Amino acid sequence: MKPIWWDSARAALAGADPTMAAIIAACGEGHLVSRDDPFQTLARSIVGQQISVAAAQSVWNRLAARARTMTPERVSRMRLATLRDCGLSGRKAEYLKDLAGHFVSGAIDPSHWPEADDDSLIAELTAVRGVGRWTAEMLLIFNLQRPDVFPVDDIGLLRGIGRNYLEGSSPSRSEALAIGENWRPWRSVATWYLWRSLDPLPVEY
């Protein structure tokens, strides 16, 4: 389902930034999609760390086929060797099992997340092994659909900024943050469109 604020965000970004307006027009009517499953969002983010969208989807497809049902209970029982056979590195396999264990034990409890602010949620999630700030930000964008998340360490976001705003040069973190200030309070939306400017396949976690 499309976020209720999506069309307003699109219009605001397009009206304030001609470059973003062109990107939005080229992308058509697509929009951010939530999977409504916090475990799968975090698990997909772990799988997708530091690899391309296409590679991450390939690994996820193999993982889902082996698991048959991608629930914390099922993944927590899978062997590390089985997870590695799906294309995960040894470390990612450990992270995924640890994440599943946190859900099974109740150490991660999504019931209070809708009321929590972004920074508090990031602090809670990054206490879990293998969940860094980027992974937490993917949950904020794709599961909770927070509108103003700016994952400045994301490789795709930086490439998108470089291609569209810096004539192909790679931005520094500070440059990316400065450019992103122009997109408040809709930086999640700007990020999504910059990803799409690089790859027509919608990014989903």
Image: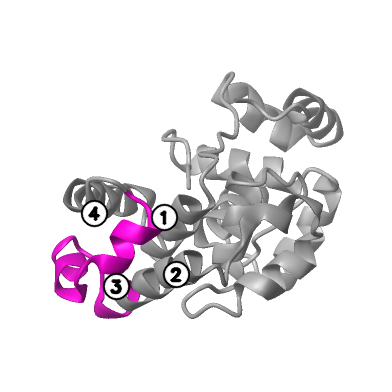
Numbered badge on residue 44: 1
Task: Look at label 2 and name its amino acid.
Answer: Leu
For image coordinates 62% across by 32% down, the residue present is 23
Disc on res. 63: 4
Position of residue 72 measured from the top left corner of the image (x, y, whole percent): 39, 59
Secondary structure at numbered mark 3? helix
Q: CA distance from mark 1 to mark 3?
A: 12 Å
Q: Residues within 10 Å of mark 4 (few under 14, many from 20)?
A: many
Side (left or right) of 137 relative to 179: left
Mark 1 or mark 2, earlier in chain: 1
Magenta-tinted stretch: 70-92
Q: Residue 5, percent across and down?
A: 78, 29
Give SS at disc 2. helix
The circle on residue 103 is none
Q: Nearer the viewer, mark 1 or mark 2?
A: 2
Q: Confirm or deny contact between disc 1 and disc 3 (CB under 8 A).
A: no
Q: Position of residue 34 (x, y in %)?
A: 56, 38
Q: Is residue 71 magenta?
A: yes
The front one of 126 and 100 is 100
N-term mark: 4 or 2:
4
Q: Which residue is mark 3?
A: 93
* Residue 51 visible to the viewer: no
Disc 3 marks a residue whose amino acid type is: Ala
Position of residue 88 in the picture relative to residue 34 (left or right): left
- Report the disc number at residue 99: 2
Q: Is residue 108 above or below residue 24?
A: below
